[in-house]
Image (cartoon, rainbow, N blue to C red):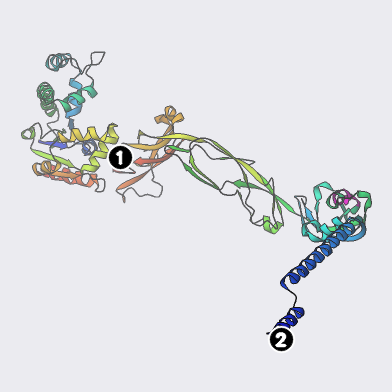
Amino acid sequence: MGPIRKSKSKISSRYPSKKESGSRKNDNIIFIICVVIAFVFWGLIKLSEVYNVTYTFNIEYNNVPVEKRLTGMVDSTVHVNFSARGFMVLRLNLFEDMSKLSIDLDNYSMLKEGDEYFIYTQELRDKLAEIIGIDETDINFSESTIGFMLENLHEKVIGVKANLSLNFNEQYDQYNNEIISPASVKVYGPKATIDTLNEVLTQNINLQSLDKDQVILVGLLNPNPRLLRFDPDQVEIQIRVEKFTESSIAIPIDLSNVSQDIQSFPTSVKIYFKVAQKDFNNIQAGEFMVKPEVKGVNLMEVDRLHLTLTRKPGFIRNERIVPAYVEFLINK
Amino acid sequence: MIKVGLTGNIGSGKSTVSRIFSALNVPVFIADVEAKLLYSEAEIKEEIKSGIGDQVFDSNGEVDLKLMAELIFNDKEALLKINRIIHPRTLSKYHQWLEDHKLHIYTLHESAILFENNLQDHFDKIINISAPFETRLIRATERDGIEQKKVMERMKNQMPDEEKNKLADFVIVNDGNQLLIPQVIEIDKKLKNK
């Protein structure tokens, strides 16, 4: 029994007990935590220090004058030297958007030299100071100007056509053609491209169950945004909606355009049409005229003549003549 | 002289066919028009008043033809009374009219209710204008501006087209597809060659 006990004691000295092992693990964790805390403090101290750095911003131009097109960039980047805290330098490097310098050409005076345009980098100080979060006096540019190429675009005034999908409540309909303001816009672009344009469509507008007037502000559909610009690029569309009713009126057939003396059967027809309720009382028979179509027709060879409405009030629609054809006899 | 009766149900196109015959120089007596003229005669108005009362008279003391139509289509007794007043006089006018046109080869008497009033014996030949029910219904509704229901009520009082076709000597089909003038000219030729 004795030797066996000795052997057990030897094993326990070579391998730490459970208690000892847990204690060492805790020591390691505490050590790692201390290292991390030290690193964090070191980082914070370093980031709060002021560094003098040269940073490269990618240039992006916005609001190019409507009559011009950006065709190239002489300088696509600008090198800026500035002093800033480490936090800001880290931020600039971490976030891609921060490295983009958007230049709104509306806000800067452009100078022209040959085919090139340029703006003074000094004018960008304010904007950069705002982006970086430092005083503008701490910013220095490596270039005094940044250049870009603008092409003069051709101008053409083109009419706007509404692209509407309208659906009305029962009995309601569009009263007259929609009013587009402005009715035409200036289109800028290369001559060859704008010469092919005859109309400018609006974005499609889908309106359902209409029963009252509509006024909509809608953008224009640019078939080639890379090359074409519109001024203005949106228009106002006014749609008048009215309640309509079906009506009819009997009208005698006017045969004054027939060279021969004929009698038609019947002598009068009925005109069916749709009319806005507000115009219903303005309908007068004298405003209608129905004549047979005789141009190019040999009366000896036909049995019937097709009737056409040669005069009608402007406010009626969907008109139809009943009957549409009449028989006739030539008086001898 | 051949006495020809021209008939056809409501919306069949009697007026148009009559006008075509007129254009061919055939005298046409339109019974409905002549009957309406009678309503303005003082003697007739008195007889109507004593027969059915003053329910069909307007504020000016004239016969309101719309009210009259409403009444006679809904009241068979009133219809009989009016017929007894109007028809003998219309026939009398017709016979006088025939005297005025006796030199013509034939004359036409247009009446919607020729068979219904057993007037067929007054004529040598009868022409019926035939048209499909639906076509007549649409024509009458659109022409008179009244509801289809009311037109159908009036149609019920008329002899069916098929029966009239059997009793007629000539049938003119006015279905909107067949030409009317050639059919009229054909009948005109036949009557003039008799």
Query: Which chain's residue wears label 1?
Result: A
Q: Amino acid at mark 2?
A: Pro
Q: Quadrant of the N terminus of chain B?
A: top left
Residue A25 placement, left or right of A271: right
Q: Is residue A77 visible?
A: no
Instruction: Please tell me if label 2 and label 1 are on a single chain.
Output: yes
Which stretch is magenta? A122-128
Q: Position of residue A69 (x, y in %)?
A: 76, 55
| Residue with the most extreme left position | B121
| Residue with the most extreme bottom position | A3
* Residue behind mark 2: A3
Local SS, label 2: helix
* Residue behind mark 1: A264
Q: Amino acid at mark 1?
A: Ser
| Mark 2: few/some/many CA within 10 Å (<14, 14-19, 20+) | few
Q: Quadrant of the C terminus of chain B?
A: top left
Q: Position of residue A296 (x, y in %)?
A: 40, 50
Q: Is residue A127 magenta?
A: yes
Quarter occupied by residue A226: bottom right
Local SS, label 1: strand
Q: Is residue B182 magenta?
A: no
